[in-house]
Image (cartoon, rainbow, N blue to C red):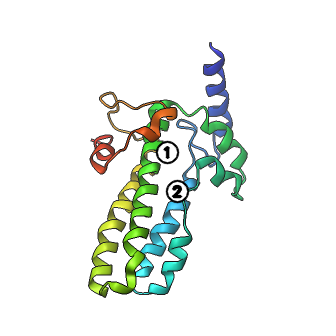
Amino acid sequence: MSLETSALASYRARAYNTNVNDVTLLATDYLNHFNEALMLAELVVDMPDMLDDLNEWSPVSYEDHFRDSGIADRKLAIEAFGFSPDEYKAPFVATTKQLDREIQDLQTKFGDIDKLEKDEIRAVATQQCAIIRELIEQAGAIINGHVGDLKSQTFQSESTEDDRMFNQDDINAMFD
């Protein structure tokens, strides 16, 4: 048994019955960060003054989210992330980076909210929030070990992940 395999087994044992999935070594608590932005975006339609709160949202790494978290298993979530098997971690990272981009895109679209009619605001929010909601669901599925047939997918290592842009079709294909 290699040292890496031994560490994986150890983290899986430690994760059992915690907030960290004992197969993927990922935790759903991270999705709260994206759910907050989604909730604020949906509120902006009827309460434009919520835009300031939405604009305060910014991407936060998985590790930083848990460093700032109050959940009991935050230390385990940070440590185990480094040992999450690539079959889960790669699509998870790709999906959460896409979430960051979609939310930032929505912030930009709402940038001139004073110049938009209420119907335009609603249309933008409805379309963009549907994409964000689907990505959150996909990230949750990955965290819970449901990644579909990834054998046909090619993921680059984390060090070059920023060099590859994933679009919605790439992410959807992970779950076909």
Pointer 2 local density, CA inside 10 Å: few below 14, some 14–19, many at least 20:
some
Q: Which residue is drawn at 33% across and 40% down?
A: 174
Q: Name the residue under label 2.
A: 31
- Image quadrant where one finds the C terminus: top left
Q: What element carries label 1?
A: helix
Instruction: Write down the quadrant of residue 81 in the picture.
Output: top right
Q: Give the amino acid type for the residue marked by disc 1 in the picture.
A: Ile
| Residue that sits furthest to the top in the current view | 1
Q: Position of residue 100 (x, y in %)?
A: 46, 56
The residue under the point 40% across, 32% down is 155
Look at mark 1 in the image and give the residue it sits on: 143
In the rendered structure, which disc, 1 or 2, sits on the residue that comes first in sequence? Answer: 2
Q: Do the residues labelled 1 and 2 touch (CB within 8 Å)?
A: yes
Relative to 26, is 85 above or below? above
Q: Position of residue 77 (x, y in %)?
A: 65, 44
Residue type indicated by callout 2: Leu
